[in-house]
Image (tube, rainbow, N blue to C red):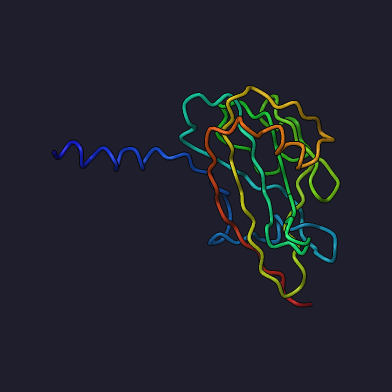
Amino acid sequence: MSLLAILPAVAAASAFTVNVDGLNRGQFGNEHVYGGFGCHGQNVSPRVSWSHVPPGTKSIVVTIHDPDAPTGGLGWTHWQVANIPPSETSIEKGASGDARLLPAGAIETLTDFGASAYGGPCPPQGDSHRYIVTATALSVASLDVKAESSPALVAYQMHGKVIRQARYVARYYRSPE
């Protein structure tokens, strides 16, 4: 009976997880904030790491999405990196736009900023937004996407291929100026 009591704890310890390193209590700092739209951040992509990749995973997609953006319920995609090999465990800080720092074979696709690169938080003044960081384990080695592929196309290509997703919720509050 005691062995059975241990098994759920072991299973929980190996859950697929994702983390954003270097945040202050889950809050993005100015280093990662967008430099535009009235925001004055440095727009450096954060280090995103994950662990306990599910068996059968052939690639990973990492997305940062703001569901609170004033877009009529669609939210705003801030970063999307597809075709990450399952042997990788992170995307390094500052990797956006630097192929040497991205995992081999990974591709940055379009964000809602219109660029195939990281775009940091920049909510309207006085707003606090959530930034959902998702690592998605897929059953295919790569998606048929290009740097010019939209977030909707990437999501369509992932449909039916998702093994598991891990989420981390970060936040950013933009002070009134």
Quarter of the C terminus within the rendering = bottom right
114 relative to 157 in the view: left or right: right
Report the residue at 61% width, 26% height from top. Answer: 85
Report the residue at 57% width, 49% height from top. Answer: 21
Q: Is residue 83 above or below residue 153?
A: above
Q: Is residue 28 above or below residue 14?
A: below
Quarter of the N terminus within the rendering = top left
27 relative to 97 in the view: left or right: left
Q: Quadrant of residue 79?
A: top right
Residue 135 on image: x %, y %: 58, 40
Residue 64 on image: x %, y %: 67, 48
Residue 157 on image: x %, y %: 71, 32
Q: Nearer the viewer, residue 113 or 27?
A: 113
Q: Residue furthest left?
A: 1
Q: Is residue 57 above or below residue 33?
A: above
Q: Quadrant of residue 173?
A: bottom right
Report the residue at 86% width, 47% height from top. Answer: 114
